[in-house]
Image (spheres, rainbow, N blue to C red):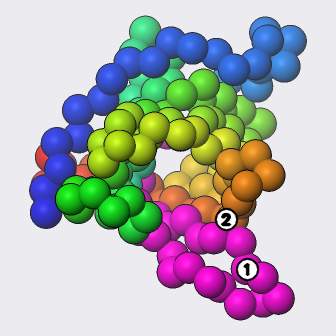
C-alpha cells in the first residue's frame, strides 16, 4: 500500500528553553523505516514487533513529522494508523518526541519516545512509553533519498 507522506507543521515545544537540546549536526529530515517493540515479560515478547515509517521535516527551523504504521490494535476497519510527531527535540546525540495518533481508526492517545542517534546520524534506537501503562523499545534507520522518493 502507498501512503501520502504529507507533513503537518507542528510548532509546540515540550521543554523549557533551559532544557532544550543544542542544535544537532545530523540531517534528520527524510523518511526513516523501523520497528517498535512491546516490553518483554520474563524475556518473552507477548506482542509482535510493529513496522513503521517516520517522516521528519523542518519548517522555519521547527522539526516535526508523521509516523505511519499498520493497524495492529484497533478493531475498526482501517488498515493503517497515522500519528503526528510533536515536541521533537534533537541534539547531543539524543532525540525525544511525542507521537500523537491523529484519530485514524479512532485512536488519539500519545506516546513518549526517547532515543540515541548513531554517530553517522543514520540510525536511532531507544525507548517509548505510555506513562505506566505500557512501554518498549524502537529503532529507525534512515532511507536513502532515492529509495524514499518512490514511497510518495
- Name which residue lies at 69% across and 20% down: 14
Q: Is residue 18 magenta?
A: no
Element assignment for label 1: strand
Instruction: Find residue 42 and report its horizontal and vertical position in percent.
Output: 82, 88
- Name which residue lies at 78% across and 89% down: 43
Instruction: Find residue 114 and report its horizontal and vertical position in percent.
Output: 71, 46
- Name which residue lies at 61% across and 44% down: 111
For mark 2, what is the residue?
137
For mark 1, what is the residue?
40
Q: Is residue 32 magenta?
A: yes
Task: Give the magenta part as a residue range.
Answer: 27-52
Instruction: Report the side of 67 relative to 6 (left or right).
Output: right
Instruction: Find residue 137 and report its horizontal and vertical position in percent.
Output: 67, 65
Q: Is residue 31 above or below residue 22?
A: below
Can residue 131 be seen by looking at this rendering?
yes
Instruction: Find residue 95 and report its horizontal and vertical position in percent.
Output: 67, 40
Q: Is residue 95 above or below residue 49?
A: above
Most frequent secondary structure within the magenta stretch: strand
Element assignment for label 2: strand
The dot on residue 21 is none
Q: Quadrant of residue 127?
A: bottom right
Can residue 83 be seen by looking at this rendering?
no
Amino acid at each position: 500500500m502507498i501512503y501520502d507522506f504529507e507533513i503537518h507543521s507542528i510548532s509546540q515545544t515540550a521543554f523549557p528553553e533551559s532544557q532544550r537540546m543544542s542544535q544537532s549536526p545530523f540531517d534528520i529530515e527524510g523518511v526513516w523505516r523501523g520497528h517498535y517493540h512491546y516490553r518483554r515479560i520474563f524475556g518473552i515478547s507477548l506482542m509482535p514487533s510493529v513496522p513503521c515509517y517516520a517522516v521528519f521535516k523542518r519548517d522555519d527551523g521547527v522539526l516535526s513529522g508523521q509516523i505511519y504504521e499498520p493497524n495492529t490494535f484497533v478493531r475498526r476497519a482501517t488498515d493503517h494508523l497515522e500519528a503526528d510527531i510533536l515536541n521533537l527535540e534533537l541534539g547531543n546525540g539524543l532525540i525525544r518526541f511525542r507521537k500523537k495518533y491523529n484519530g485514524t481508526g479512532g485512536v488519539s492517545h500519545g506516546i513518549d519516545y526517547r532515543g540515541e542517534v548513531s554517530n553517522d546520524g543514520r540510525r536511532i534506537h531507544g525507548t517509548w512509553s505510555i506513562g505506566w501503562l505500557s512501554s518498549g523499545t524502537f529503532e529507525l534507520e534512515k532511507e536513502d533519498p532515492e529509495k524514499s522518493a518512490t514511497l510518495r
